[in-house]
Amino acid sequence: MVATPARLLSYTAVASAVAVSVQAAPIGFNPYHPLPVGVKLDKSNPAYGAPTRNAVPPVLLEAPIVANATNEAPRLLENTDPSNHDINALEQFFKTKMDTNLDKLNRDYSSFSFKPAPWPSSYWPIYADGINQRWAGDNVPAPSEKYAKAFGLNVDQFTAAISNNNGVLSQSGGKACKSNSDCSRQDGEACGKRRGESSGYCIATWFGICHAWAPAAILEPEPKCPVTYNGVTFQPFDIKALLTQVYDGANVGTVFMGARYDGSSDSMDRFGRFKDPAHRDLGPGFFHIALTNVVGRFKQSFVLDVDPSSAVWNQPVRGYQIKKSKIWPVWGATSVFFPFTIKYPFNADARKLAHIEIEVQWVNESGNDGPLVSTGIVDQFTEHRTYEYVLELDDDHNILGGEWLHESKKDHPDFMWFSTERPRDDTVTNVGLSYANVQKLLKQSLASSC
């Protein structure tokens, strides 16, 4: 693990000194990974769709519950004055301040939907050997086999490189198996075997390259027609696989927000919230600001890990709609949404609370071939999820923080991020996949009639 900067440790030390039984969620105390804007999308990036390697751990800043805070706690917290790392990152990338006033966000950015939508595809699970999977049937070559043959590579060497990078062989340090019964159902494992092999390794079924599919689906046009190159026919789904594999190895820049949860405990505090701050984030205050600014204001899609647990499910966002926004006096909202306490316990600076219901739409995985966006089939693979929370506001209705409500306490996004760029035109990944070659196939697919 990489150590956090010394200045961040000072925040953590102060937080430890004033920690109480549970923690509040003003935006300034949301957990985050201390990553720079433009951090590369590689196996150390928290967005990676499998266990990370040498990832920078999250910074967990603790703030006291108002009702439990000692007289010393407020002074200690005021002296640290932590700003929100992730809002700063957004402002650095977009080169302007984020709008944080709820009235303005409701008026100007209450909804947005991307047209065209991101395209559905597979996350190319590792247990199925990634893009070595013969998705069209045992007698039809896999996308990797087709690419190697069409572009003059050794098929066995290329598919082995794929497997070692993010296929079955990448998990060769795991438990050996011959069938799924050898693996842990509790951990969601399957016995991943390379084609033609009788044994393999137990691999969690969520491991895959969703971190590469999601940005590719946002930034690249969807392949439309089959194309034939050097006697090899590529279906649109094959080209999607190759685009996804390129994004896995292109080291594109990213802006990452939130803190990836890698734990295994679902323990709750007395307010029905996850105890671990990394499990409890994204904080709804930051989530609301980021969603309405990045998507609604700047018209840029991003990726959500929609699973708050240790599993990572990166999904490209298609749009959102604010369905309810009602401002309450703090005492009134407390009596309705937090009846277990007389005083609102999470943020002493809150002057009003806003009850929010917001629907977020994202694109799910699909194994269907052919164009799915232009045909409207993407609607069948679009998830509509409503999140509910309160936003903490100052007297002018600027957002200070927030708390998840009801089912959203357990079911909310873990982190969010977006790619800052497409791969360079001359990109050749560590497995030998050329972005220029894949672009040839994509352009031919888009120009063809079918």
Image: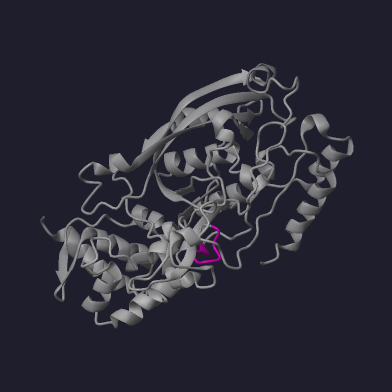
Using the rendered view, name the quadrant where residue 333 is placed.
top right
Main SS of the magenta segment?
loop
Using the rendered view, name the quadrant where residue 138 is placed.
bottom left
Q: Is residue 41 magenta?
A: yes
- Residue ranking furthest to the right: 71
The N terminus - image quarter = bottom right
Query: In this rendering, does residue 259 appear at all?
Result: yes
Q: Is residue 313 above or below residue 350?
A: below
Q: How is the image coloured?
A: one colour
- Residue ranking furthest to the left: 449
Query: In this rendering, does residue 114 appear at all?
Result: no
Q: Which residues are drawn in magenta?
A: 39-46
Q: Position of residue 218 (x, y in %)?
A: 36, 52
Residue at 43% from the left image edge and 71% from the top image edge? 199
Residue at 79% from the left image edge and 38% from the top image edge? 21
Relative depth, front residue between 43 and 118:
43
Q: Is residue 73 left or right of residue 315?
A: right
Q: Position of residue 147 (x, y in %)?
A: 26, 73
The C terminus - image quarter = bottom left
Q: Position of residue 79 (x, y in %)?
A: 81, 45
